């Protein structure tokens, strides 16, 4: 049983109250966490504020910041197996995913932004013979980073790596149901030699600790990944203090399958898109929109493959689908499945709790066919292993259906004509459109959503620039002093 305090100013602090993190596969406590009070939030923010204002990090030469970040990456690489096991214990995801997705992506994120620190540059702007005009990019200040529970380490570094590379200081709040690997970063940052106050990590409820952090007047940027509902509260907090706001929110991503698609490849790719991380993925391929001429054939292939998915404790090397994150979330997903039965009839595959799982928050991978476009399971984000299929007649109807959603995080197109795939990608209103693949996200490319799926972009150079301000410097070069009156 691990025990964690609050990581503030490069030191661990205990609190009067604690809570436990539960292994969703066994329902057993695996860690005890400190529950922050409002004064602890203030202490963490002011530690970050002091560190930023002192210039100990923001004014450090960019190359030195890069070297320190690479040191963090090397330390995480050396402890990769420890972090992978902890991520599986805390979230339930298969160890196969933790080892081959979460930890490598987190390490790559740090390496990537460490390499970009020297490219945070401005530009010279030709304006006149009597003035020199140029821009510089400067860090924003104190960043509040609120992390969700589905990919804790990946999404922590999606914010930490570019924020730190740009010279900001950060206060991180992980989700209460999956804080373990984020808290483990405290010792890693301290051992790496990061200056005091540059990274602070606090735990506690979103309603108290999260809101106090987001509404703190000394915070310069709010960076949030989570539900669209909570995202609205983050926008309200940013308006209160006129602070910068970046949101990566929910989705209801379509997988559009055209008549000329390779159906075996589409079935395999859609399963990865829909059921990676138990379907607890904001860009999951939850709506299959298929041309009616190939509808039955595609459904048969998807259903056959789904029956082979091994569900169980994520520490089992053969398991490819673990439990959902909590008892409450499992209840929510089961409720959606029951709603789906009333809207679309009996599922083709799944539809309940696996018979052989007597402990843990497991749900069968579930497939609904001929789902009406107006139904709840078609339109609402379920965030679990529930896949819907709806046939349409022709390309125009398929694209119209893909865009018929308040979300716009991602989409995929499955076709044998790559050129047509590029043309159709421009017609879909989503931040990421994949062609003949789904759920591939690279640290080097921007990621974010249209419509109610978010504001701004993370990752890529765009993600780095989002953690900086542009300052314009104008110098008078005239031979005579400027005189107006």
Image: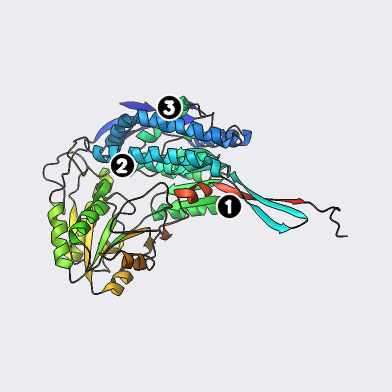
Under tag 2, what secondary structure?
Answer: helix
Residue picked out by circle 3: 187
Asked if residue 365 lies left or right of residue 40, the reply is left
Residue picked out by circle 1: 242
Q: Residues within 10 Å of mark 1 (few under 14, many from 20)?
A: few
Choose top left, top right, bottom left or bottom right for residue 155: top left
Could you tell me residue 208's position as x and y percent?
45, 42
Under tag 3, what secondary structure?
Answer: helix
Could you tell me residue 160's position as x and y percent?
46, 40
Colour scheme of the rendered structure: rainbow
- Quadrant of image for the N terminus: top left
- Which mark is in front, 1 or 3? 3
Q: Are marks 3 and 2 in contact (CB under 8 Å)?
A: no
Q: Work out whether 10 lies above or below 226.
A: above
Asked if residue 407 lies left or right of residue 260, the reply is right
Q: Residue furthest right?
A: 485
> Which of the numbered marks, if any, corresponds to residue 101?
2
**Residue at 84% in and 52% down:** 479
Q: Nearer the viewer, residue 185 or 337?
A: 185
- Quadrant of image for the C terminus: bottom right
Nearest to N terminus: mark 1 or mark 3: 3
Nearest to N terminus: mark 1 or mark 2: 2
Give the spatial CA distance, label 3 vs label 2.
23 Å
Give the spatial CA distance, label 1 vs label 2.
36 Å
Q: Work out whether 198 lies above or below 301.
A: above
Could you tell me residue 9's position as x and y percent?
52, 29
Could you tell me residue 140's position as x and y percent?
58, 45
Q: Residues within 10 Å of mark 2 (few under 14, many from 20)?
A: some
Whether residue 99 is visible to the viewer of this picture, yes or no, is yes
Q: Work out whether 21 lies above or below 128.
A: above
Under tag 1, what secondary structure?
Answer: loop
Q: Nearer the viewer, residue 228 or 283?
A: 283
């Amino acid at each position: 049983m691990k025990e964690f305090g609050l990581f503030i100013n490069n030191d661990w602090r205990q609190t009067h109250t604690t809570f436990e993190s539960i292994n969703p596969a066994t329902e057993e406590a695996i860690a005890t966490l400190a529950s922050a009070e409002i004064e602890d939030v203030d202490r963490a923010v002011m530690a970050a504020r002091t560190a930023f204002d002192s210039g100990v990090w923001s004014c450090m030469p960019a190359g030195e910041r890069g070297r320190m970040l690479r040191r963090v990456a090397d330390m995480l690489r050396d402890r990769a197996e420890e972090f992978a096991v902890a991520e599986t214990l805390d979230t339930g995801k298969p160890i196969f995913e933790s080892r081959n997705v979460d930890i490598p992506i987190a390490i790559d994120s740090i390496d990537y932004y460490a390499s970009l620190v020297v490219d945070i540059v401005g530009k010279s702007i030709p304006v006149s013979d009597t003035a020199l005009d140029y821009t510089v990019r400067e860090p924003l200040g104190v960043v509040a980073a609120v992390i969700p529970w589905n990919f804790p380490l990946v999404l922590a570094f999606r914010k930490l790596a570019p924020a730190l590379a740009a010279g900001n200081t950060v206060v991180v709040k992980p989700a209460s149901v999956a804080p373990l690997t984020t808290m483990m970063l405290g010792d890693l940052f301290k051992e790496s030699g990061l200056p005091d106050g540059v990274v602070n990590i606090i735990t506690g409820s979103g309603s108290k600790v999260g809101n106090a952090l987001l509404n703190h007047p000394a915070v310069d940027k709010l960076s949030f990944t989570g539900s669209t509902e909570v995202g609205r509260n983050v926008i309200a907090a940013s308006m209160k203090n006129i602070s910068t706001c970046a949101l990566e929110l929910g989705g209801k991503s379509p997988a559009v399958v055209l008549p000329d698609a390779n159906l075996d490849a589409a079935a395999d790719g859609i399963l990865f898109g829909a059921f990676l991380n138990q379907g607890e993925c904001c860009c999951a391929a939850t709506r299959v929109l298929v041309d009616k001429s190939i509808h039955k054939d595609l459904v048969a292939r998807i259903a056959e493959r789904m029956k082979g998915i091994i569900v169980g404790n994520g520490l089992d090397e053969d398991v490819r689908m673990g439990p959902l994150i909590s008892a409450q979330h499992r209840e929510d997903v089961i409720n959606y499945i029951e709603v789906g039965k009333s809207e679309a009839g009996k599922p083709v595959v799944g539809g309940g709790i696996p018979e052989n799982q007597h402990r843990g928050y497991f749900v069968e991978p579930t497939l609904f066919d001929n789902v009406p476009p107006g139904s709840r399971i078609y339109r609402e984000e379920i965030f679990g292993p529930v896949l819907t299929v709806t046939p349409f007649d022709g390309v125009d109807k398929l694209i119209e259906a893909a865009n018929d959603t308040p979300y716009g995080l991602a989409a995929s197109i499955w076709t044998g004509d790559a050129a047509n795939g590029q043309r159709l990608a421009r017609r879909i209103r989503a931040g990421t459109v994949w062609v003949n693949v789904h759920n591939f996200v690279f640290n080097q490319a921007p990621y974010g959503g249209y419509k109610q799926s978010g504001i701004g972009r993370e990752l890529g150079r765009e993600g780095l620039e989002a953690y900086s301000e542009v300052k314009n410097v104008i110098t008078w070069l005239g031979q005579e002093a400027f005189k107006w009156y």
